[in-house]
Image (tube, grey):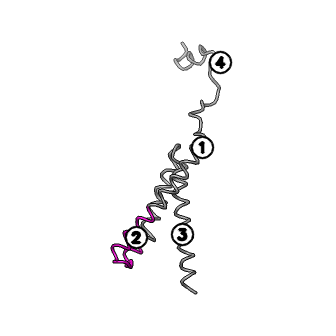
Amino acid sequence: MPCREEQILTEQNPESLNYAGPSVGRPPLPLKVRRRRLIYGFCTGIGLTVLAVLIGVVAGNGKPGLGAVLLILLLVPGCKLLAALVLAFIRDWRSFGGGLALSSLLIFLIFLGTCAGFAR
């Protein structure tokens, strides 16, 4: 008497097996929506940085102290880049995360330009 696995293999009709690839999930978001989320992420990142600068200036009575400078230069961009990295793995929020990353890069370039202007 054949074992159960052999019976299953011999009884199964190869034509009934589905050899198609995996089904495709949802279609991607329209380009208009992705652009809008990129701009929203960019504006949110710039707004967070401006808010951190204002808090640092107010806390330092018009002149930011060392703690505020470290907050502005390290903590805020680090949090934004970490959020952008997390959002890169969420399908519908990738463009928002890209906007956050772009805002961090823009703020970095502004900071470098400011430092170069003070060096003269």
Spatial separation of the CA atoms under disc 3 and disc 4: 61 Å
First of labels 2, 4 by sequence position:
4
Instruction: Report helix, strand or loop for mark 2.
Output: helix
Q: In this view, does 72 lie to the left or right of 112?
A: left
Q: Mark 4 points at which residue?
A: 14
Instruction: Report helix, strand or loop for mark 4.
Output: helix
Q: Which residue lies furthest to the right in this view?
A: 15
Q: Mark 3 points at which residue?
A: 108
x, y percent for residue 86 = 48, 52
- Stretch in magenta: 48-71
Q: Mark 2 points at which residue?
A: 71
Spatial separation of the CA atoms under disc 1 and disc 3: 28 Å
First of labels 3, 4 by sequence position:
4
x, y percent for residue 88 = 52, 50
The residue depicted at 56 percent of the width and 85 percent of the height is 119
16 shown above or below 64: above
Residue 9 is a magenta residue: no
Instruction: Report helix, strand or loop for mark 1.
Output: helix
Dominant SS of magenta comes to helix
Q: What residue type is labelled 1?
A: Lys
Spatial separation of the CA atoms under disc 1 and disc 4: 45 Å
Asked if the residue under mark 2 is in contact with the one under mark 3, i.e. CB atoms within 8 Å, the reply is no
Spatial separation of the CA atoms under disc 2 and disc 4: 64 Å
Q: Check the picture and name the quadrant holding the N terminus.
A: top right
